[in-house]
Amino acid sequence: MLNPYRTIPVTILDKKTLFEGEVWLKLDYRLDFKPGQFIEISLPGFGESPVAPCSDPIDNKFVEIVVRDVGSLTRAINSLAVGDKIHLRGPYGNGWPLKKLLHHDLIILAGGTGIIPLRPLLFNIINNPKKYGKIYLLLGAKDPQSHIFRDNFAVWKKKFFHFKTIVDQAPNNYLGLKGVITDLLKPLKLNPKKTVALMCGPEVMCPFCVESLEQKSIPSDRIFISLERRMKCGLGLCQHCNCGKYLVCQDGPIFDWETIKDELRR
Amino acid sequence: MVKRLSLDNISKFYALVAAEYTVYSPSQKGGLVSLEPKKYFDRYSLFKFQTIMPPKKVLLENVYDLESNPKEQKLAFFGIHLCDVKAIATMDRIFAKDPFYRAKRDDSLIVATGCQPTESCFCHVFGANKHQGFDLFIQEEHDGMFTVFAKSAKGVELLQKSKGKILMSASYQPIGQNQNEIDLSELTDAVENRRLFEQHWQGIANNCFGCGACTAVCPLCFCFDTIDRTDPEGGNCHRSRTDDACFFANFSKISNHDFRPENVDRLYNWYHHKFVRGPKENGDFLCVGCGRCITACPANLNIIRILSAIDNVFDRATN
Ligand code: SF4
Ligand code: SF4
Ligand code: FES
């Protein structure tokens, strides 16, 4: 019987600090994953932690991840150098419901690092422009530096029908928009009959976005959210990840709002 | 196959099992009766009262190196009760894909026996008093003899080797039961409806220490944590699996958020898992009514009273 807890050592091919405490790693590993799924990364001695791959799922020669400096594991990983090894296993979870997105307009909302599990989907959309309708991409962040993947902004602006970013706080000379993500969402005219919403970000952001989407008559079963929980095993066993009656590592991490809204506070 | 054995032959039968298996059987240890590996039959092997810890303590023993290949083992549980047997059947479904559980369970043997209800058990509520799920069942008769029922191929094979008269027919004595009752028909709906019972849950949580004793003794509590340990010699590192308890603060905490910050959130989650999520995920409640959590609770919290009270309020609220 296969041991599902066994990890694979993989070599770090490239490493870049996105901004203080957030490190991008390119790993020498072919990972067959769906956009929105997650993996468990680890270092012997420092335990495991769930992260979502952020690379193009088609280009599966390598996999890219972003590691946030939040605990001892991620801190240890961030101090590694190119050529060092980290461990991983996965992928786990359901991923974004690609079939339901086909030929729909997509309104994609990401707060801060919430863009990470969405980025593989953005690659998918760019690679298959005919499969999707209009793409609205809205990104919110604490401050201008917190917008990770700024290198991609030019491409996204070109490829997507509507692309806007906003920040909470910024120096006076900042040329971009200041405010919250719903400020970007409210003025949009969306076609409620053929729009699907996808979001990922701090959980407090989501109800506000949902409210605004519902005002635009987008039904709650066409609003999808990626949840962050303490996915310790990824296998449906350890029970650390449940959200109400769902196991986020098995039934999620992507849920439609209709299904999950009553579970969030349990 | 059914045989009638004397006490002496039961003791020899135990030795037969022990020749093939590592046998865990109720044993006296420090004034308590617990499941321990034991080579010889003694007067605790068919103990009528509950062992402190259920068989999960053995089947889900902490794993030293989660990335190693589990070693297949031949374990026998001799003298466990029907509630624990039912709990093992549910665990089998939950841990079907876990190689460490399977390595202990796949070749294991269950020799169950009858019991005497305590004031805190309520197995009949969950149908956990049925004679099923074991390889062998040993029933003490009024004349001091024992009827042994073999229900599986490996059970029959072992029983064939033992001395004793073959019986053409025999029947199980019903397992004794007490007055404890819980109405299950609306239990899931009632537990699911947290808001209706917020005061009730808060009241219980105010008394609960969050110590997790109930989870440690429950045959159907199985959550775990993984911890990396370094060998004192050699400096090798292993990822180990250890027991956890959903009652502990930080159980569902991530770097920037705690999803169950209050004791009431965690206590509620325990009941919710057992009576809402359990039926949804495993087709069965994660409770067999063994009553161990009642015995173990230092705050005298009582699952029977807690569930009955919810049922009553729910009845009043919905009718
Ligand atoms: S919840 Fe209590 S009564 Fe039910 S199986 Fe667990 S320990 Fe026994
Ligand atoms: S044993 Fe009692 S006090 Fe301890 S966590 Fe369980 S219910 Fe609370
Ligand atoms: S991460 Fe362990 S059960 Fe979901």
Image: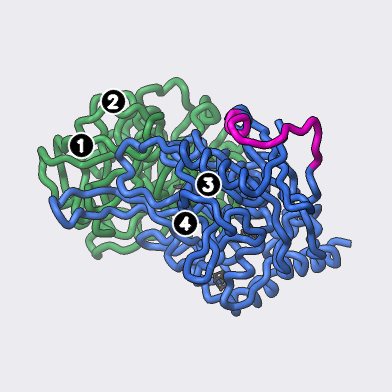
Query: Does the residue tagged 3 have its C-beta within 8 Å of any atom of ligand 3?
Result: yes
Residue linked to disc 3: A247
Q: Which mark is residue A26?
A: 1
- Lower position in the chain sequence, tag 4 or tag 2: 2
Q: Quadrant of the C terminus of chain B?
A: bottom right
Q: Position of residue A60 (x, y in %)?
A: 28, 25
Question: Chain A hue?
Answer: green
Q: Is residue A162 above or below residue A60?
A: below
Residue linked to disc 2: A60
Which region of the structure is painted magenta? B157-171
Q: Secondary structure at mark 2?
A: loop
Query: Label 2 sits on what residue type?
Result: Asn
Q: Nearer the viewer, residue B157 or A36?
A: B157
Disc 1 is attached to a residue of which chain?
A
Give me the C-alpha separation between circle 3 and circle 1. 29 Å
Give me the C-alpha separation between circle 3 and circle 4. 17 Å
- Lower position in the chain sequence, tag 2 or tag 1: 1
| Residue under the image location 73 percent in, 70 percent down | B305
Residue count near mark 3 (Cα–Cα under 10 Å), binned few <14, some 14–19, many ≥20: many
Residue B165 belongs to the span the image colors magenta: yes
Q: Nearer the viewer, mark 3 or mark 2?
A: 3
| Residue under the image location 55 percent in, 40 percent down | A190
Indicate which quadrant contains ligand 1.
bottom right
Question: Chain B hue?
Answer: blue
Q: Which mark is residue A203?
A: 4
What colouring style does the render use?
A: by chain
Q: Secondary structure at mark 1?
A: strand
